[in-house]
Image: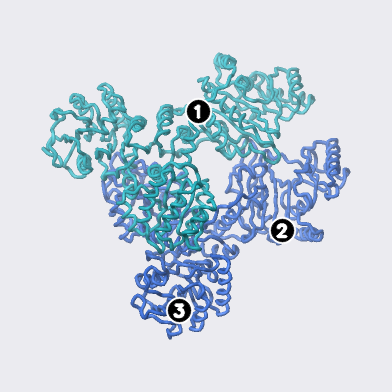
Chain colours: A blue, B cyan
């Protein structure tokens, strides 16, 4: 049985054995029984208890072997020390799917780790499947099965929620009682010793009852599998994720290369973005976003109309929409004329449409319909404040009707009304999302629009270019043979050259005569850079000399450089000197790079270069292999992008060429698994907008 | 009677005439009467109605003149056309304080504006005082006076809320029913034709019942008065402000000088920051921040301890605290030993302290007390999730006791529990702030810590330097005489020189011989800059030539410059050429400036210079006159600050000197009201960390 089949068997279990079931109030074994009963589970329940004949009124068994019937799933709530024995018993009784509720495993360290390893071995050996250990259990609202010890039962809904923290499940179930949406299925993942959250996602991919996936996780152990599964599933079902443990504990030394900039959470974030996962940082936003995905149609366009019965909240909504980059619909004369015909003269028919405090239910409903009907509106935000006319409940009912009538439009609401409303609303079974605050509505809407854009982009294959791979093979082979980890500057430039990355003109000089010839070929001014596999920070030792304007200066600087090397006993550490065309970067310096991150894979970076790398941190990351969309996002997602425009008379840079650089770096690291870090720093744009990489560093393992 | 006395008289009115009182359900005149009655107003109510003998059971009068008793306040809810007559009647009846509820004034434009002007004239002539028109009314929970037509009555509390939007008052009153705090007084400001929000703030400054001020406004008409009053009052009572209308409608051309960077909301924000006002952008945060100011003691320090019964929420809180820059308390061994003694082995005694799901009420309370007792903790965040043990209400009660026992510590909570809790909590009259989400608690806490820091800084007088004011007087007089608006580059530099702003060495050359002499004095390389009162963008016409390395080059470039000027017929437009020392800014370019903004006054700016001004927008603003704190904040509040550090071998810049530049610019614009804009762009920092202003532009009116 595959993990997916096993999860299905458990989620739709027709019979459940509760091992460690108990009559003791407040105990986990009792809570488990209570939930199965009070949520209304219709399958067979087999409580296992050594002493009691009945548990919560259901006949109990002393041992699993006594059951003599098929058991789809066993829920284990016995002390951790008894677990191994119970697994043996389950195996003997032909029970192959278990949930281990019990704690006392990996999470306590030491002997717990040992015990968990033994559990996993047994599960493997017996070809069993396990959720947990150290979890709350699982819930399926469809079959009214609450096989968890959560103190309450969830609202039913369209959401599948998998969580590494049982408490977060409890918390959200409690918070959702006030909302108009709920959970179809909940899986408390526990230590994920066997079945993990990716298995659950693959199961939900096929379970029609789950239309939206919520995930609370604390780590992503296998980023390749994550990217593969989430990229596929997120196309069909939105995946909303809250990943905690973002803050980097302890000081991390800041340095200016790709590797050190790619902090753990930055890497995770890059992975999530490229996998189409909607990420939230806070529980509040996690729930708000789930609400809009649950209750709203993905908008056809991005044009928002606001309908309000008060001016102040209208202005606040405009501010908020502006903050989140959401466009306001420009209402046509035709639409405004229709609105004016039904509204008092003090009302405003412009967006935000303010139908003032005296608005009747008819005026509210008809205005909403006029807006929903109009072509220029994709999304309608209805704001209702109880000021003078109370029609909150009726308005929700009317919006529900309009929602059915205009299925192509997206409707959301902000209600600030009397407390009685919320009570009634909770019982209405409405599909209209009601937020308390505009910012919650708008920020959630933003997530939906972002997802819409992501889906519209579609999937692209990584772009591949025709390159001289053989040449790179030779350079890397040579580097390996020499038993060094860093390619020299010249070698790194040669690798870029082989991959047709635009470079300033350069060549390697072994003596002054070489240098003179090269400089004449290139044209002054030129730059000298020592090329070495040993000296990585060539600037620090004065190994880079810029702005050499003529042969006389070249001679002088060459001598000066070698005197310095001699003095520091470094002459033998270099493999020559790169003579390079001097580029006037006009302050437009960028950085690109790739780093191989543990658990994440190759991550490409792009951003502002020079001294701005450390100070401004305007850099973005995306996992490799990059496709054209990824490259575009890398470039446009930081303020570095603005520097590439036509600015102060400097010509606009060729962004297509910049994308090509990133795509070629991605191709390079995908072609050569040995490469663990590449830095192209800086990439300069000259006055005419032309792009040149002027330095290179490649590290292999 | 001063406005403050008038507001007091109205807020504590012993007798109220309701002009336009009505028995018609749903009418404003009826709602007003209902609220006065149902909130429990104990003063005398005089309904005025032409037809009915009684309004809501209270004897009515046909006319104000019939009352024959003192009336502290009249509330006018009659059609706008009748208002002028009613004001006459009020005057005749010796009623000097009125609230005009009626709409139909400035807010409708046209005749409404005319009518409002007439109302104001009458109010002035009769020496009356007025709140409104076009408002909801006022509320005083202390005297149980709800003189508004808001459909509900507020919770009592310590907050004074003044709002330009009546609907926002309604909305917040509704939302606050779910919270543990409320309003002492509410003022719906309406059009503020007479009494405005600053009058209200000055009244609350002296009203002991109002301890926290909340303000919703849409504009700040008088920024000088705003700054004066709010700076004074905010020291004693927190002022929390939501100002809407932030988004700049229509495209604003982006340019690189101070004036165009100081957008309307940026200017307002600078004003608010310097006035000690706590600003929120969204209603959600407005309420959350009010809650912490209402219910929590200002912390003594900034060290936060987190107490939780679940790991997941604990990790989320650490992430969130980290996001908001709040420090976690490092618990001492002593504290951790005490915690371990009362907690099960699976619990974690490190901060965040995780007392796990099984935590009893005693364990919760005792752990909280251990943390509150410990010196290393200033703030305690208690997180409670209902997972297995339900002790939410009792825990709140115990925290209430601990709050009294440890009055120097700040306590806040996040509860995610069953719905029954919230019902009970609303009736408990607790002073413990309960948030649903950690991010709401932490972001509010951040505001409180920011306020603490602001108050600790104290008030500083603007720093003044000994400068050569006379010289500047002469330059400005000359400029005025010549009837131009822009000082030449040389004149601008001379002004800076007179104010001892550090400049690159320079002098004015009228011919090549001058230039040669100056360059020799300064030392090569030098820069040439045309000096003109007519050509403001000298770079655009090639009027700046950098990096001139020797006399030969100087001669060549000088000739080239004058050929160009000749060709473009500009020779007569210049007043000479500034020869200036060339500074190697090592990419460390900054900008400083001052602009006179309408309604705001002089605003100082500091940030990243060069091509980064437009692209990165790393600039900050503060209103003048600046004190040392303002100057420090200007420098440290953008990423530009990081560029001033020791970076890539470049020495750290002298920030004291940078502050001095800003303070001197502030002094300059305060000394000369004629100056409407100054740009110092760029200010460069060389490798040794020395600071030089290298260009200047001053505009006068």
Dot 2, how many residues are within 10 Å of its Cα: few (below 14), some (14-19), or many (20+)?
Answer: many
The residue that mark 2 highlights is A675
The residue that mark 3 highlights is A72
The answer to whether the residue labelled 3 contacts the one labelled 1, judged by CB atoms less than 8 Å apart, is no
Measure how far apart labels 3 and 1 are at the Cα level. 75 Å
Badge 2 marks a residue whose secondary structure is strand
Relative placement, left or right, of A218 versus B156 is right
Give the quarter of the image for residue B84: top left
Dot 3, how many residues are within 10 Å of its Cα: few (below 14), some (14-19), or many (20+)?
Answer: many
Q: Chain of mark 2?
A: A
Which of the marked residues, 2 or 3, is nearer the chain's N terminus?
A: 3
What residue do we see at 86% from left, 39% from top?
A: A559
Give the quarter of the image for residue B78: top left
**Any part of residue A332 in sight:** no
Relative placement, left or right, of B112 versus A505 is left
Q: Nearer the viewer, mark 3 or mark 1?
A: 1
Residue B654 x, y percent position in the rendering: 64, 32
Question: From what the image shows, is residue B263 above or below residue B175?
Answer: above
Relative placement, left or right, of B425 versus A193 is left
What residue do we see at 48% from left, 34% from top?
A: B270
Dot 1, how many residues are within 10 Å of its Cα: few (below 14), some (14-19), or many (20+)?
Answer: few
The answer to whether the residue labelled 2 contacts the one labelled 3, judged by CB atoms less than 8 Å apart, is no
Same chain? Circles 1 and 2: no
Q: How many marks?
A: 3
Relative placement, left or right, of A325 versus B91 is right
Q: Chain of mark 3?
A: A
Badge 3 marks a residue whose secondary structure is loop
The residue that mark 1 highlights is B460
Residue A31 x, y percent position in the rendering: 39, 69
What residue do we see at 48% from left, 83% from top?
A: A93
Residue B514 x, y percent position in the rendering: 73, 17
């Amino acid at each position: 049985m595959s993990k997916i089949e096993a999860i299905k068997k458990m989620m739709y279990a027709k019979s459940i054995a509760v091992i460690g079931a108990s009559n003791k109030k407040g105990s986990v074994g009792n809570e488990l029984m209570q939930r199965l009963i009070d949520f209304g589970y219709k399958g067979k329940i087999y409580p296992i208890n050594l002493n009691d004949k009945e548990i919560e009124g259901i006949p109990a068994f002393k041992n699993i072997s006594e059951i003599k019937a098929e058991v789809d799933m066993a829920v284990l709530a016995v002390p951790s020390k008894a677990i191994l024995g119970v697994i043996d018993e389950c195996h003997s009784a032909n029970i192959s799917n278990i949930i281990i509720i019990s704690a006392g495993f990996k999470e306590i360290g030491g002997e717990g780790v040992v015990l968990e390893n033994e559990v996993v071995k047994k599960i493997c050996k017996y070809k069993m499947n396990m959720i947990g250990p150290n979890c709350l259990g699982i819930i399926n609202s469809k079959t009214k099965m609450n096989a968890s010890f959560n103190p309450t039962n969830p609202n039913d809904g369209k959401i599948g929620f998998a969580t590494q923290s049982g408490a977060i499940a409890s918390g959200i179930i409690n918070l959702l009682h006030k909302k108009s949406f709920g959970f179809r299925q909940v899986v408390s993942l526990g230590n994920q010793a066997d079945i993990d959250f990716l298995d659950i996602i693959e199961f939900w991919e096929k379970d029609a009852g789950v239309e939206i996936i919520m995930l609370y996780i604390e780590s992503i152990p296998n980023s390749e599998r994550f990217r593969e599964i989430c990229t596929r599933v997120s196309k069909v079902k939105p995946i909303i994720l809250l990943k905690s443990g973002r803050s980097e504990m302890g000081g991390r030394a800041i340095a200016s290369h790709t590797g050190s900039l790619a902090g753990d959470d930055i890497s995770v974030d890059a992975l999530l973005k490229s996998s189409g996962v909607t990420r939230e940082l806070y529980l509040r936003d996690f729930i708000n976003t789930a609400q809009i995905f649950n209750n709203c149609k993905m908008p056809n366009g991005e044009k928002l109309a606001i309908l309000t019965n008060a001016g102040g909240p209208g202005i606040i909504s405009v501010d908020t929409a502006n903050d989140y980059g959401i466009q306001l619909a420009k209402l046509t004369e035709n639409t405004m004329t229709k609105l004016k015909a039904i509204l008092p003269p003090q009302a405003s028919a412009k967006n935000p449409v303010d139908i003032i405090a005296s608005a009747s239910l008819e005026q509210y409903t008809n205005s909403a319909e006029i807006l929903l009907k109009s072509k220029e509106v994709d999304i309608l935000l209805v704001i209702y404040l109880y000021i003078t006319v109370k029609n909150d409940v009726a308005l929700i009912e009317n919006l529900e009707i309009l929602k059915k009538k205009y299925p192509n439009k997206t409707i959301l609401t902000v209600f600030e009304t009397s407390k009685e409303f919320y009570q009634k609303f909770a019982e209405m079974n409405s599909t209209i999302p009601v937020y308390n605050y505009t910012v919650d509505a708008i920020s959630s809407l933003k997530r939906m629009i972002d997802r819409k854009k992501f889906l519209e982009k579609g999937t692209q294959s990584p772009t591949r270019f025709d390159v001289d791979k053989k040449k790179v093979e030779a350079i890397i082979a040579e580097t390996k043979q020499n038993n060094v980890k860093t390619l020299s500057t010249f070698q790194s430039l040669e690798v870029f050259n082989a991959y047709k990355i635009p470079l300033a003109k350069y060549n390697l000089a072994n003596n002054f005569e070489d240098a003179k010839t090269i400089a004449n070929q290139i044209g002054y001014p030129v730059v000298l850079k020592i090329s070495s596999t040993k000296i990585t920070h060539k600037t620090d030792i004065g190994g880079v000399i810029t702005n050499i304007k003529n042969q006389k200066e070249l001679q002088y600087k060459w001598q000066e450089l070698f005197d310095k090397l001699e003095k520091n006993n470094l002459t033998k550490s270099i493999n020559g000197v790169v003579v390079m065309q001097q580029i006037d970067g006009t302050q437009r310096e960028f950085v690109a790079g790739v780093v191989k991150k543990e658990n994440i894979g190759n991550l490409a970076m792009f951003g502002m270069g020079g001294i701005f790398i450390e100070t401004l941190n305007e850099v973005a990351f995306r996992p490799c292999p990059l496709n054209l969309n990824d490259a575009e996002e890398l470039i446009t997602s930081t303020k570095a992008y603005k520097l590439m425009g036509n600015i102060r008379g400097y010509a606009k840079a060729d962004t297509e060429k910049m994308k090509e650089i990133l795509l070629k770096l991605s191709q390079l690291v995908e072609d050569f698994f040995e490469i663990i870090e590449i830095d192209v720093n800086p990439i300069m744009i000259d006055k005419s907008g032309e792009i040149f990489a002027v330095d290179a560093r490649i590290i292999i393992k």
